[in-house]
Image (cartoon, helix red, strand yellow):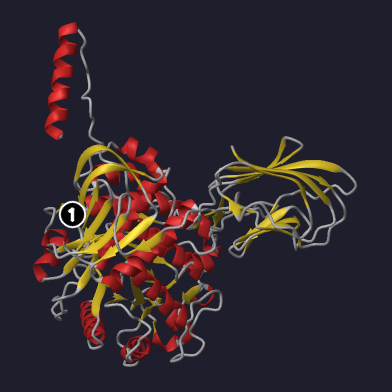
Amino acid sequence: MDRIKRKAAGIFLFVAAFLGFSFSAPLHAENEKPFVIPELTQWSGADGQTVLSHRIAVKGGKGAVKSVAEALAADYQTLTGKPMTCVSKAGGGDIVLQLKADKALGEEGYRLEVSDRIVLTAATQRGLFWGTRTILQLVEQYGDSMPRGTAVDVPQYAMRGFMIDVGRKFFPMGYLENLVKIMAYYKMNTLQVHLNDNGFRQFFGNDWDKTPAAFRLECETYPGLTAKDGSYSKQEFVDLQLLGDRYGVEIIPEIDVPAHSLAFTHYRPSLGSKEYGMDHLDLGNPETIPFVERLLKEYLEGKNPVFRGKRVHVGTDEYSNAKKEVVEQFRYFTDRMIRYVESFGKQAMVWGALTHANGETPVKAENVIMNCWYNGYADPAEMKKQGYQLVSIPDGYVYIVPAAGYYYDYLNCEFLYDKWTPAVIGNQTFDEGDPAILGGMFAVWNDHAGNGISVKDVHHRVFPAMQTLATKCWTAGKTTMPYATFDARRKALSEAPGVNELGRLAAPLEMAEVKAGCQGPAEEVGYDYSVSFTVEAQAEEKGTVLFESEHAVFYLSDPREGKLGFARDGYLNTFNYRLPVGQKVTLTVEGDNRSTRLLVDGKLREELKPRTLYVITEGQKADFVYGNPYDARPEVYTEGQKMYYQPTLVFPLRRAGQFKSGVTDLKVQYR
């Protein structure tokens, strides 16, 4: 039959040419490589589309395959509102899932063939799961008509990850759970959770006792150590790891010692270094190592330990190297922590520090993973020579420090997409596929405790970086799409099925009347929004809420001064405006990732925008003029002693508060 079709097509072309017609494209065009994140590593296009039947057929390795099928069906229904059913025999339009030995696919690769049906094959459950993420992304873009062709998709790097600093800023467990789902949707397989850290002393009167520090995990060994302003129970952390197992994302817990350790010295001051600062554990104190080992033991011992995964990170970065004796103590401590973690059957991870702390005391390298973040602290080529497995996480490329004025506020995604792969660590470039380079990660460090940054603000920075780094860690230097095209098309994809941390709206929202206590039109609306409403103002008690969500509250009368304002993440921000009792006004709130504005009857009343908070010490004050009779002492500002406060708001819409005023004509839209 195919021969007859080809012959007929040839006759048609001959006749057309004889009559003077010409064609600039073939009669049957093969489908171009479909857009997914990360980009497919191989694609062979075919002609036409296949319409999904809404059935999934399971073949081979039935227990593992069935769980992948169930996850696919649930996520498909979340995305489309349509159910999928599992069947035993495959037919046209069905999705067929099967495990099949194939060395070419490795641990995480998969083969996707779209013909009269959609056949997804992998050697492992995780590879099969990654293939379902591709199917779901195609559904987001093409609906139920899948472009025909064959993809063979295999990652270039085994570790593709993200590190989040929850020590300096608490992230609710619900966010971490959503983060796992987002990472899985983009085939990122490693989440490193930095469980302890502290602020910078200069922002808190140069007083270690006043400097915030936190250890975020429930602790029975040292009652009172766990942070009071936000923490995770052991069961919550176990559940996060189990969720990660289901989604193919390994959770790597990190307890950072012996620097970044103010939370521990707040708890036991005798462990703090008098010479290098209380954020350093005193390595000469015989109680230091037993303290840390007892802490680790609580989470590592037993048949079902709190730290369930195969890897545990023990920190070991940025300790002083001022004295040889201290360097040798640091090296001994690092080696001791590596071996202690290994004694519980775990693989140890450390931050790169052994060029900075070069010395004679041996530190175990075999089967140890090192985050290479700054080549001055750990020279990657030398660390490779010593035998460490390396994770590329160069600070000059992939460190986000929100609103700090150094490193990146938002990563330079265009540069990373065009120029970076995990083979690039600082100023050193290794061969792609070098077995010493396990993969790449990026990081969020919340250095400036107190700068007003919200969880939503952090996520706004993380998500575009996640999509970009997912591509570069999976595809490496084999991307074929220009960045401008990638950047435009990535925005059409969701964060993950059922996840909307960005607060995206599909369409504008309206409510003719907002009644006290009523359900709102959405959970929230993210940047860049405009929320307007008309108020017939009555006297409201302080603390009267207009709208609230799980993450934020917008007040008609704030709890302190009775002004219009909002609170989120423990920060209260107010406009210098009170409702005019007995009058009718139209209020508009506009918000983006930098500021929040209030308009009254269409005119800008006030803009809350980033403002600089300076740190002033007594030694920095000076008389403006010698002998000034007014005793004027202008503040003298020094570089590095300021932070940038962020008064942002993702507007809450879940539920209306108990207000007395009449609220009508609510309109929610993007600007």
Task: Name the residue carrying label 1.
Answer: 423
Q: Residue furthest right?
A: 582
Apparent side of residue 412 relative to residue 220 in the rendered image (left or right): left
Nearest to the observer: residue 321 or residue 314? 314
Q: Is residue 477 left or right of residue 213?
A: left
Q: Going 55% across and 44% down the picture, which residue do you hit? A: 506
Residue 497 visible, this angle: no
Residue 99 picture location, percent across and down: 22, 65
Name the spot of residue 475 as percent of width and height, x first.
22, 50
The C terminus: image quadrant: top right
Asked whether 10 or 202 is in front, the reply is: 10
Residue placed most toward the observer, 164 or 605: 164
Residue 404 falls in which quadrant of the image? bottom left
- Quarter of the picture holding the N terminus: top left
Q: Is residue 262 left or right of residue 636?
A: left
**Residue 163 percent coordinates (x, y):** 35, 64
175 over 397 or under it: above or below: below
Mark 1 closeness class: few <14, some 14–19, many ≥20 residues within 10 Å: many
Residue at the left extreme of this rendering: 385
Determine the secondary structure under disc 1: loop
Three-letter amino acid code at disc 1? Ala
